[in-house]
Amino acid sequence: MRVLLIKTSSLGDVIHTLPALTDAARAIPGIQFDWVVEEGFAEIPAWHPAVAQVIPVAIRRWRKNLWQTLKSGEWSRFKRRLKEVDYDLVIDAQGLLKSAWLTRYVRRRTAIAGLDRESAREPAASRFYNRTYPVAWGQHAVERVRQLFAQALDYPLPAGTGDYGLDRNRLLDAVETEPYLVFLHGTTWVTKHWPEVYWRELAQRMGERGWKVRLPWGNEAERQRAERLAEGLENASVLPRLSLAGMAKVFGGASACVAVDTGLGHLGAALDVPTLSLFGPTNPGLTGAYGRSQVHLASDWPSCTPCLQKTCTYQPTAEDKRQFDLRHEQPLCFTRLNPQRVSTQLEALLLAPETLR
């Protein structure tokens, strides 16, 4: 059986789809998937044994210059590639108009499955499917995709935690002898950033316990932040810019990871790296790192967490102004996850038997 999967972005969403592929491969021997994914994340699907072809798409880049996209022939080549195979089924696992639109370019009589109107993030996307399925909200994203696949491919949903299905030994280098921690400080929303003064204090605390800290980055702003975090700390080092495969190798040697709500945190979880994830405005029950040895610390700031907002609208009280440094401790919901609390949890994670790999 050959299935075209459409799940274009983002990094976390792509990784959250892998357990559903593992379920399907175990339920239907010989099934193969071709996966349409944003070019920046195209490394990830190729790591799963059930994926036959990765079909990169560049929606983010193409829409910035539509004329050049058409003129270069990229769009035409992409459409032709979708028609090369007579697929048994297309699954749009994203439920957005931009992903649903891509289903128009497969062969005409192909069955197209996706979420129904009440289940899709953009209800109008369901108009593009001829097979729609209900999946309840309020669940972790991994479980929602697993349920969609089980219905679309007609197999019983496996019980228990999903399996990413990755061969860690193929992805990872030999583990280094010197133990280290990875701090994932970069994320998209301003409100999801743990304060820099907290990162530095945590690095200092772990340095006093003999731990080295490695700081990755993916863009110029993150590089500058990493350098500020490492400045003057002998135990902290800034990594060079790495591909996703390069980051997988870094994770392979790490004893543990501390992360904000970020795509790389999900990659670490997929590779079974013990991770302490820090949540302020977002809900770990819906999008937290999924897998073994994953610990979520969520703020319990009164009245507004999780707010799910990209911009903090909380107005500090007079007591907040007396108690906190408002220049450096923002957003205030993260003051509930201060470095002392995080370091205590991190040490407990490092001492857990499953962490001692």
Image (cartoon, rainbow, N blue to C red):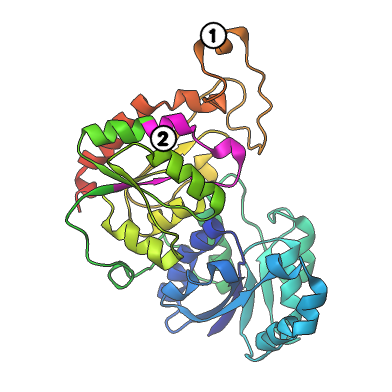
Residue 164: horizontal and vertical position, in percent?
41, 63
> How many numbered markers are drawn?
2
Does the magenta portion include 196?
yes
Mark 1 and mark 2 in contact? Answer it, CB < 8 Å. Answer: no
* Residue 217 marker: none
Q: Quadrant of residue 239?
A: bottom left
Give whichever of discs 1 and 2 has the lower sequence position: 2
Q: Is residue 307 left or right of residue 256?
A: right
Residue 155: horizontal and vertical position, in percent?
50, 70
- Near mark 1 (Cα within 10 A), the count class, few <14, some 14-19 or many ≥20, is few
Q: Say which residue label 1 marks.
A: 322
Q: Is residue 261 among the parts visible in the rendering?
A: no
Q: Is residue 174 left or right of residue 51?
A: left
Q: Is residue 69 left or right of residue 34?
A: right
Residue 326, above or below 45: above
Q: Is residue 318 among the parts visible in the rendering?
A: yes
For the residue pair 75 and 3, the one nearer the viewer reads as 75
Q: Quadrant of the C terminus?
A: bottom left
Residue 286: horizontal and vertical position, in percent?
54, 45
Circle 2 sits in a helix, a strand or a loop, which is it?
Answer: helix
Residue 227, above or below 94: above
For the residue pair 162 and 47, the one nearer the viewer reads as 47
Residue found 69% across the figure and 27% down from its top: 313
- Near mark 2 (Cα within 10 A), the count class, few <14, some 14-19 or many ≥20, is many
Give the residue type at disc 2: Trp
Q: Say which residue label 2 marks.
A: 199
Residue 306: horizontal and vertical position, in percent?
58, 32
Give the residue type at disc 1: Arg
> CA gap, disc 1 to disc 2?
22 Å
Q: Which residue is situated farthest in the front direction here? A: 232
Q: Which residues are magenta?
A: 181-200
Residue found 62% across the figure and 48% down from its top: 137
